[in-house]
Amino acid sequence: MGRAGWLRVAAAVGCAALTCAFATALVARRVAAWRRWRQALAVLRDFEESFATPEERLQRVVNSLAIEMFAGLASEDASKVRMLLTCVDSLPDGSEEGIYYAIDIGGTCFRFLKVELGAGSTIINQKVEYQPIKEELTKGTSEEFFNFIASTLKNFIEREGDEGRALGFTFSFPVRQLSITSGSLIRWTKEFSIEEAVGKDVAQCLNEALVRNGLNLQVNALMNNTVGTLALGHYYDEDTVAAVIIGAGTNACYIENNEAITKRQGLLTNSGQTVVNVEWGSFRPPQIPLTPYDICFNNETQNYYDQGFEKMISGVYLGEIARLVFHKMAQESDVFGTAVDGLATPFILSTPCLAAIREDDSLDLREVGRRLEEHLKIPNVPLKTRRLVQRVCDIITRRAARLAAAGIVAVLQKIGRDGTRCGTTQVRRMAGVPKRSVIAIEGGLYQGYSVFREYLNEAVVEILGEEIAPTVVLRVVEEGSGIGAALLAAAYSSNRQESIGMT
């Protein structure tokens, strides 16, 4: 072989060596990428296992919450749920007539309502206006806060041209109620921190502000948003026995027989029944493990383990749980690429965004990709990672919805509408004549997120069983916290005599 031949052989060997080296490097990169992908899948697998809510576990959550409700009715501070007595013993029945006003405060935007009622459960007309609350008012003084509310109500009434007969006041913060028209603030939640208002009668504070602003109206009924929702539900359907809020926060109230209440006997009513505000957000179900994501979340807030049930269910928190899971995946793998700084920002991912990701049914999950790029600044996410992201959002949604369902069944169990003896694990069977039980539900998470609603409805049927489930109706109620306040004001300003007060 001549020199030229040897050169050709050497060139061929060199090319082969380069090709082999390139192939080896490519295989190595693919193996590394696969390992990193498997690390992301391992995070998902552990996360899914820790968020599991099998029926048996939910049944134990039901029993646990029902027992806490019993304890909360026995004495103050005996339970993880407050079981606050609302002093409401009479709900609207459809006979109310006239024009009534309501104020609904539950966050940094509050509402004024004018409601005109006709006989026969007829709402002839209603007008709603929204008013944001400046941040400085949420941290100022109680006088400044209530003056702002009263002056804005005065402007609203002047535009409407009719002062109305009575005023309902929905105040969705923990209150120890003293009568239907008075209650002292226990503590602020959400973004509010007007510390000198704690312990004050919030209805009296508003009444004094109304007088200062020249209004003749006074608070006829004080309540929280769940009681308002119950009032509106009962206005249309007398079989309504409870109300649940599932939105930015979550809570429940229900109608309780007085003989079941041993604490604060002086507040019990002459009608034999009282509406109880459960305050179930503070419940911490021991059967549900706190995951690293729940623990991290609670560590980042001021109140460690506070409002545990609410943080697992409500709309303020679900997006943040997802963000923590994605951040963990980014730390363990490169599924999101290198542009992951946004994942380190708390609360950058909202629950409406989580819902949009979960409900994307396009073949290429283009909405998932758009949301990741717009909200988390992560571009060009491959399809398999989009599927991973959607799966995380589904797992979070499912746990939240099924826990909310367990809460609803616990309320039914407490009042004997679930087919078992409270606290037992017997198979639920119908005893005697079936009783129809309507649960009024309000809140954007349940009303606006179809996947959440479907998971919750399915879980209620799963827990109750096929025999009892048909007797329970979950009914969406809109504007309950506002219109319901006007309805209760109407009920307590009519010919009925107020039958509740300290003795």
Image: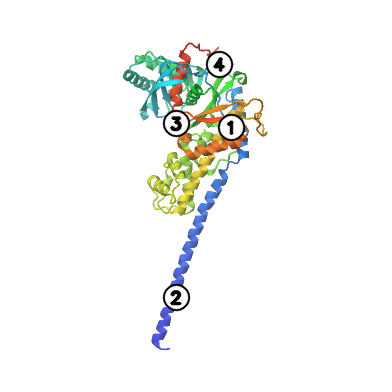
Decide: few, some or many residues near mark 1? Use Cα within 10 Å; few <14, some 14-19, many ≥20.
few
Residue 124 position, x and y percent, is 40, 20
Compared to 165, does 317 lie above or below? Answer: below
Q: Nearer the viewer, mark 1 or mark 2?
A: 1
Q: Mark 1 touching mark 4, by CB under 8 A?
A: no
Q: Quadrant of the N terminus?
A: bottom left
Mark 3 vs 1, N-terminal side: 3
Q: Which residue is mark 2?
A: 16
Q: Which residue is mark 4?
A: 267
Q: Residue at x 59, y 32 (%)?
A: 470
Q: Which residue is mark 1?
A: 470
Mark 1 vs 2, N-terminal side: 2
Residue extending furthest bottom? 2
Q: Which residue is mark 3?
A: 190
Displayed quadrant of residue 130:
top left
Residue 489 position, x and y percent, is 45, 17
Displayed quadrant of residue 485:
top left
Helix, strand or loop at mark 4: helix
